[in-house]
Image (cartoon, helix red, strand yellow):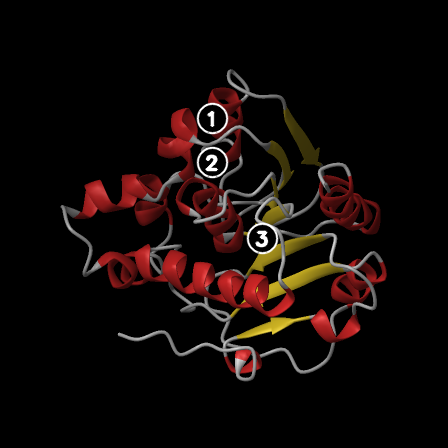
Amino acid sequence: MEKLITRENLRNFAYCNDHLCSGPIQGLVISFFGLGCTSMIHEDPPDACKLAEKNILYLFPYNDPWCWMNAQAVAFTDELVDVLFHRYGLPEDLPIISSGSSMGGQSALTYMHFAKRTPVACVVNCPVCDLPFHFTERPDLPRTLYNAFYHENGSVSECLARYSPLHLAPRLPKAEYVIFYCENDCAVSKKLHSDPFVAILSQRFPVTYYSVPGRDHCDLPAEMLSAYLHHLMDAVLKNKR
């Protein structure tokens, strides 16, 4: 299929804060959403406004709500990034940060491996890390994962492993990795997702790992939300050319 996304119709396929940036673009933060999100953003989110103050683009792709960063979601995201790079004549070494929560966290980590332009950092909150296990973790999940990878080559177990951060950990690119995880997460087990993922990845790169007590899935307190945003900004500013 021919590519349909242009600078004129970008808002039909993603939210971007480019209209808020007033100076030369310093970097790009891609924020992937959690499972089931179907909303289009019509009002500028607070994080998008704060990033725009530093002339950092904030891109929120409207991927399939059950995408699990499958091949189509990777290509779709790459196309959105292409549009922004061409629209603003951005240099190929512009710092890109991959971020997200829950399925969005899995998407952000998986995108590190498959992205056309490899991000310099990944900042995630309560990411799903073990897709094969997640298939069995809750009764609402098999339908979504089967939907995401139905047209992929290989068995279900092979497809799940192909896009699973835990299984990709030995091959993820060198970058800055920052992971927040709520200790009382009842939706995505910290013990079975982020703990083993960080154990593998930290053998290769330094990993910043925030273990947040007393909180359920993705429920970061105000100080952790502030730290999350700080890491997004800091990763751009220290990597800008």
Distance in Å between CA atoms under marks 3 and 1:
19 Å
Q: Amino acid at mark 1?
A: Pro
| Residue 121, x across and y down, in percent | 61, 39
Viewer-side residue, 200 vs 119 = 119
Distance in Å between CA atoms under marks 1 and 2:
6 Å
Element type at mark 2? loop
| Residue 174, x across and y down, in percent | 53, 28
Mark toward the start of the polypeptide (3 vs 1): 3
Q: Is residue 203 above or below residue 135?
A: above
Q: Which mark is residue 196?
A: 1
Please say if the residues under marks 1 and 2 sit with CB atoms less than 8 Å apart.
yes
Element type at mark 1? helix
Viewer-side residue, 95 vs 47 = 95
Callout 2: 10 Å neighbours few (<14), some, many (20+)? many
Q: Which mark is residue 100?
A: 3
Left or right of 159, for residue 166: right
Q: Amino acid at mark 3?
A: Gly
Q: Extreme left residue here?
A: 154
Q: Residue at x 33, y 40 (%)?
A: 133
Callout 1: 10 Å neighbours few (<14), some, many (20+)? some
The C terminus appears in which quarter of the rendering? top right
Q: Which mark is residue 193?
A: 2
Q: Amino acid at mark 2?
A: His
Element type at mark 3? strand
Mark toward the start of the polypeptide (2 vs 3): 3
Left or right of 224, for residue 41: left
Left or right of 43, for residue 71: left
Q: Is residue 7 above or below residue 199?
A: below
Q: Residue at x 58, y 53 (%)?
A: 100
Please say if the residues under marks 2 and 3 sit with CB atoms less than 8 Å apart.
no
